[in-house]
């Protein structure tokens, strides 16, 4: 066992710890490399390697785990969603995962406006449960869809509505906690639950507690709130505990306050000339009683020139305040008093959500600085008195420039709280030294403005070393005395907040290669948008496998953490042959949802392809690969070789077993005649205006889709031609990690397409996405790849751009079905939505992922997850659709999944339009010319 000289606890473990824990607790005890790797990091710059994890089932389990850890001299850190910014959700001993079982909502009492919750309950679930009573929990961090109540209490989280409803500390009534020594305490006011000696210590330091904390600071989150224990403040033990970052006790239950929901919430967006003007205006709006006063500048969201312009829909200005108010009267009063350049009142809930999403995603989007480069937490959430915010921001921007750094401030301007990610160089020794110097200088700047080093996320390791600059040595020493009264053994989250580790030690970038998938995975900052439990909402796809399993290793973040640890080689030691990483990636559907939904653009589908490519490399790779990688992954080649004869083979009883796929679902039938053969025999009715891509699925498995697309294009006056030879985007090779074969296929395709410059219409969304993204990424040195990628259009895009005066046939019925996940992530579906509306197809298509995902749903062991993904959004949408609804699914996998799991008949939009064109009968066709025959595949 290894002892940490800085702390009395042991930071290693002996061989009996795991066995003793398994014998003592009913919950899961996991000391495997994968379990440890998943919790080495939170959403900060720091990394600590734990001995193992425990998922306690109840308070008794928590107490038992603490007893065993104390007996072994091993520290403990409680963990919720792991979205902490300061490093406080990582630990060197045992990590208590409070999300797996201690996630219940015990009760909601609308009469007393309170709720009783377990620490692992996600805030979003509490708010959903309170909504029917017209109530909500006031604090609402941007991570509300995954952050837990226990984590919010540990960090004293706030969120956008704190100007109206305060911090978490303002909204907690009582707490049930267990100390490291196993004492169970109920914390409340009037000294209730105080450990022995605490109140006497407070009594000896009354003057210090009355004068040592800055005044006029609504977001003072740093340090222990010992001033809450003053007699004139009710000797509030529970309030003094909130924000202690797991260093004093482990929460097992909390009673929290609920507040009334606004009756008519409106979003008022105020545009100002620049950030300083917006910051100076924020404090002046507070007397009008807004529910939020959030601020951001153009360098975060991009310049907007007018309401509804661009992607943002923001009013004119270079910076904006987002102010939620209750009712039209409040909105008008706010606009009149704002003295803004421009203003926009958003009444539509969907419009409000779209604008709020800009703010909620800022923790991720701010990690990419303008012009390229990564930005990191480290000076994430300081706060100053609101009236000082404009002056502070001016000085802060100047300090950034003096250090040669870039960052994009945004945040809770009404409370004087600023978030920012800075482009620190945390990979080199010089960069780390510069990081320390900047942290020290900005701490002095915050203190000079009367501020708090932390205004929301807590101190953790990132800022605790600097607390003497804010509070002075005497008050910080008192923090240590109080810590020892609660936790005399120093076993709870050592190195955080009290007697902290240095702010520049234990950085998660140490030892990480500067290039490769490990560096790419390190871009995951841990905000855990991928860790939202289902069903998914809105237009989000990420992360279907996590919603199906609820297991962190099947989230985008979890997989990124495992790849990070694989690159480091300390815990995950197998390198590219790692079974831990292979197992986690096995349930990745390569849906590409994270490419668009992840705020930092983590592209797990690309990482998976690279991993599989290397995992099965070498002379033995061919036989270690799953057979489905050769069969389903090589489907284009097999279909080109054997055509319809392959369909005969797949109907044999042993075909599934021979192909290495599941026998629980039928293999897709192969068409007796390909689309390319039909096209060559038929010719074209129009001179070719574009190239129609004969992807494998359309050509061999769904030629009716290709025929329908030709009908629609020609009705729109657009003649189509096929490439002059066999082409393939390489999708199936990419998704199975056969990147060498994918590159060869892609190069042959580029040889066929040559230097053509016209538009290319691709009917299969997954193939279009592969051509748009994977092709240029896998062949970056071939300029033809980028040129072909730029020519790719969907059918709807082609009709809109090339035949803007064409009128589609009227269908006038409801539509249901699914937007392909690759279309969502890469292509976008705005043109498709407009085309459906013009054709009279009403209703929105479901998002998410169908769960079949090419070969994924056919591979043994994936059946349950495949169906669970379909149950997330697709199948419920189909069950709710009337029998007369048109079922749309442009993706072949989506149509196959719907056919396998329902009795509905899904079709490509092209088929529906072509059928209506033929039904109308009034559309005349020109005489057919004799164009040359073309090939494809």
Image (cartoon, rainbow, N blue to C red):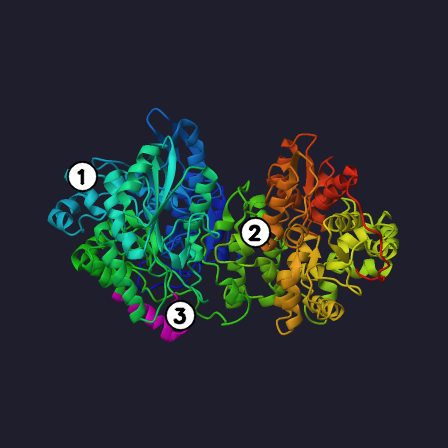
Residue farthest toward the top in the current orientation of the protein: 111
Q: Residues within 10 Å of mark 2 (few under 14, many from 20)?
A: many
Do the CB atoms of the residues marked 1 and 3 lie less than 8 Å apart? no
Q: Which residues are magenta?
A: 423-441
Labels 2 and 3: the sequence-earlier one: 3
Q: Main secondary structure of the magenta part?
A: helix
Q: Residues within 10 Å of mark 1 (few under 14, many from 20)?
A: few
Labels 2 and 1: the sequence-earlier one: 1
Q: Quadrant of residue 784?
A: bottom right
From the viewer's perspective, tell me whether residue 786 is left or right of residue 752.
Answer: left
**Quick check: can you spot residue 694?**
no
Residue 723, percent across and down?
77, 63
Q: Residues within 10 Å of mark 3 (few under 14, many from 20)?
A: some
Do the CB atoms of the residues marked 2 and 1 lie less than 8 Å apart? no
From the viewer's perspective, tell me whether residue 695 is left or right of residue 438.
Answer: right
Q: Residue at x 54, y 57 (%)?
A: 34
Comparing 15 with 512, the one in front is 512
Label number found at residue 767 = none
Q: Real-space Cα distance between discs 2 and 1?
A: 46 Å
The N terminus - image quarter? bottom left
* Residue to which mark 2 is pinned: 554
* Residue to which mark 3 is pinned: 425
Q: Residue at x 77, y 52 (%)?
A: 698
Q: Real-space Cα distance between discs 1 and 3?
A: 44 Å
* Residue to which mark 1 is pinned: 233
């Amino acid at each position: 066992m290894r002892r940490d000289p800085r702390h009395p606890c042991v930071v290693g473990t002996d061989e009996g710890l795991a066995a003793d824990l398994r014998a003592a607790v009913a919950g899961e005890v996991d000391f495997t490399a994968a379990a440890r790797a998943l919790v080495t990091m939170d959403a900060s710059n720091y990394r600590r390697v734990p001995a193992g994890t425990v998922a306690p089932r109840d308070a008794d389990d928590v107490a038992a785990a603490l007893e065993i850890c104390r007996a072994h001299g091993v520290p403990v850190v409680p963990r919720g969603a792991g979205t902490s910014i300061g490093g406080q959700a990582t630990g060197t001993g045992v990590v208590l995962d409070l999300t797996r079982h201690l996630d219940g909502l015990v009760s909601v009492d609308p009469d007393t406006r309170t709720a009783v919750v377990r620490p692992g309950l996600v805030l979003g679930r509490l708010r959903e449960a309170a909504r029917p009573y017209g109530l909500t929990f006031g604090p609402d961090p941007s991570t509300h869809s995954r952050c837990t109540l226990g984590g919010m209490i540990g960090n004293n989280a706030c969120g956008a509505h704190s100007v109206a409803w305060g911090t978490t500390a303002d909204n907690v009534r009582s707490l049930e906690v267990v100390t490291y020594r196993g004492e169970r305490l109920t914390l409340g006011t009037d000294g209730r639950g105080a450990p022995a000696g605490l109140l006497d210590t407070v009594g000896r330091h009354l003057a210090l507690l009355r004068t040592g904390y800055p005044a006029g600071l609504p977001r003072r989150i740093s340090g222990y709130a010992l001033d809450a224990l003053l007699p004139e403040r009710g000797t509030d033990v529970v309030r003094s505990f909130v924000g202690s970052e797991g260093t004093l006790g482990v929460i097992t239950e909390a009673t929290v306050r609920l507040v009334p929901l606004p009756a008519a919430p409106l979003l008022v967006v105020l545009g100002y000339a620049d950030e300083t003007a917006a910051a100076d205006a924020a404090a002046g709006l507070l007397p009008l009683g807004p529910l939020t006063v959030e601020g951001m500048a153009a360098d975060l969201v991009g310049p907007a020139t007018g309401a509804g312009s661009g992607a943002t829909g923001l009013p004119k200005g270079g910076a904006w305040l987002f102010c939620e108010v209750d009712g039209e009267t409040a909105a008008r009063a706010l606009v009149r008093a704002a003295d803004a350049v421009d203003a926009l009142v958003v009444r539509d809930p969907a419009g409000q959500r779209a604008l709020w999403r800009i703010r909620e995603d800022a923790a991720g989007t701010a990690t990419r600085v303008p012009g390229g480069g990564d930005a990191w937490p480290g000076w994430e959430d300081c706060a100053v008195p609101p009236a000082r915010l404009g002056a502070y921001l001016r000085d802060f921007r100047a300090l950034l420039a003096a250090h040669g750094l870039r960052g994009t401030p945004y945040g809770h301007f009404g409370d004087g709280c600023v978030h920012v990610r800075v482009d620190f160089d945390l990979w080199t020794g010089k960069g780390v030294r510069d990081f320390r110097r900047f942290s020290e200088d900005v701490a002095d700047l915050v203190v000079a403005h009367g501020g708090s080093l932390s205004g929301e996320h807590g101190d953790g390791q990132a800022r605790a070393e600097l607390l003497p600059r804010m509070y002075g040595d005497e008050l910080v020493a008192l923090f240590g005395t109080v810590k020892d009264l609660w936790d005399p053994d120093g076993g709870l989250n050592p190195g955080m907040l009290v007697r902290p580790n240095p702010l520049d030690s234990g950085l998660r970038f140490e030892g990480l290669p500067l290039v490769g998938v490990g560096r790419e995975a390190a871009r995951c900052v841990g905000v855990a948008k991928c860790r939202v439990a289902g069903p998914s909402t809105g237009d989000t796809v990420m992360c279907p496998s996590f919603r199906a399993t609820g297991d962190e290793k099947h989230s985008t973040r979890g997989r990124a953490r495992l790849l990070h640890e694989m690159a480091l080689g300390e815990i995950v030691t197998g390198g590219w042959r790692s079974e831990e990483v292979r197992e986690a990636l096995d349930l990745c559907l390569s849906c590409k949802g994270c490419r668009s939904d992840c705020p930092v653009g983590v592209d797990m589908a690309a990482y998976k392809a690279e991993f599989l490519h290397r995992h099965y490399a070498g002379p033995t790779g061919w036989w270690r690969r799953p057979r489905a990688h050769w069969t389903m992954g090589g489907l284009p080649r097999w279909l080109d070789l054997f055509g319809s004869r392959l369909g005969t083979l797949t109907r044999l009883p042993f075909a599934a077993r021979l192909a290495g796929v599941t026998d629980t679902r039928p293999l897709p039938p192969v068409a007796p005649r390909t689309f390319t053969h039909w096209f060559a025999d038929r010719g074209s009715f129009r001179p070719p205006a574009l190239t129609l891509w004969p992807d494998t699925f359309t050509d061999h498995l769904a030629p009716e889709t290709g025929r329908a697309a030709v009908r629609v294009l020609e009705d729109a006056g657009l003649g189509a031609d096929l490439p002059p030879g066999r082409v393939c985007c390489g999708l199936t090779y990419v998704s199975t990690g056969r990147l060498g074969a994918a590159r060869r296929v892609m190069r042959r395709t580029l040889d066929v397409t040559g230097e053509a410059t016209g538009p290319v219409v691709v009917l299969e969304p997954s193939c279009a996405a592969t051509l748009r993204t994977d092709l240029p990424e896998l062949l970056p040195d071939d300029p033809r790849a980028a040129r072909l990628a730029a020519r790719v259009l969907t059918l709807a895009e082609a009709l809109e751009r090339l035949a803007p005066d064409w009128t589609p046939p009227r269908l006038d019925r409801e539509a249901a079905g699914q937007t392909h996940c690759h279309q969502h992530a890469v292509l976008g579906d705005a043109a498709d939505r407009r085309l459906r509306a013009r054709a009279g197809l009403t209703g929105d298509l479901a998002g998410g992922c169908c769960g079949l995902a090419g070969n994924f749903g056919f591979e043994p062991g994936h059946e349950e997850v495949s169906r669970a993904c379909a149950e997330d959004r697709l199948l419920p949408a189909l069950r709710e659709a009337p029998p007369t609804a048109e079922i749309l699914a442009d993706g072949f996998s989506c149509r196959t999944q719907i056919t396998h799991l329902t009795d509905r008949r899904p079709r490509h939009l092209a088929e529906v339009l072509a059928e209506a064109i033929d039904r109308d009968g009034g559309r005349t066709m020109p005489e057919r010319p004799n164009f040359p025959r073309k090939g494809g595949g």
